[in-house]
Image: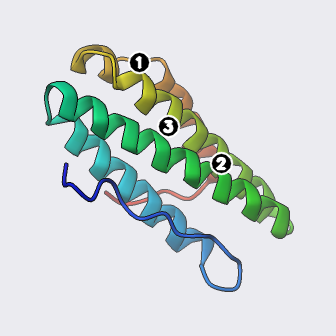
Amino acid sequence: MSAQGVGPVTALSPATADFKTRWETDLRQARKDSAQCAGLNGEAQSRCWQSVATWAKDRSSSYEQLSRQEQGARVEQARSAAHFFSVTAQWASACSSLSANACASSPLIAQMQQWKESVGIGAQP
């Protein structure tokens, strides 16, 4: 992980960000940052996972805020995205003190997958 930490946190706004594009970008960033953390060892790995947890928590808040601004089906998509990143934050936080195998087999992964699917927009790796 670089000294700069994980990806930037950007505020979401219906006027400035297309939901589908933002969601796919955030999913790619989460995958990239998680893979980077998994490749580290010791204290660097723990710090990396904590950075991912903080970033995911911020993403969750942004999508929750967006859900209050949207209308129709997009409200539920934004809420599901908020839940996805909330669980992602929990998972990353747990991974900071788990072995790589325990992290990879966490039951939180299934929850993240369910929330991701409920958004209804798949992101390409």
Colouring scheme, one of rainbow, by chain, secondary structure, one colour: rainbow
104 is higher (above) or lower (below) than 24: above
Q: Is residue 109 at all visible to an observer of this figure?
A: no
* Point 68% across, 76% down: residue: 13
Q: Position of residue 49 (x, y in %)?
A: 34, 35
Amino acid type of disc 3?
Thr
Q: Closer to the N terminus: mark 1 or mark 3?
A: 3
Q: Nearer the viewer, residue 109 or 64?
A: 64
Task: Give the left or right position of residue 34, taking residue 94 as reference.
Answer: left
* Point 51% across, 73% down: residue: 21
Q: Secondary structure at mark 2?
A: helix
Determine which of the numbered discs, if any, sits on residue 106 in the image: 1
Determine which of the numbered discs, if any, sits on residue 88 in the image: 3
Amino acid type of disc 1?
Ser
Disc 2 crowd rating (10 Å Cα; few below 14, some 14-19, many 20+) is many
- C-alpha span from label 1 to label 3: 11 Å
Which quarter of the figure is the C terminus placed in? bottom left
Determine which of the numbered discs, if any, sits on residue 82 in the image: 2
- C-alpha span from label 1 to label 2: 20 Å
Cβ atoms under marks 2 and 3 closer than 8 Å: no
Q: Nearer the viewer, residue 90 or 125?
A: 90
* Point 61% across, 71% down: residue: 19
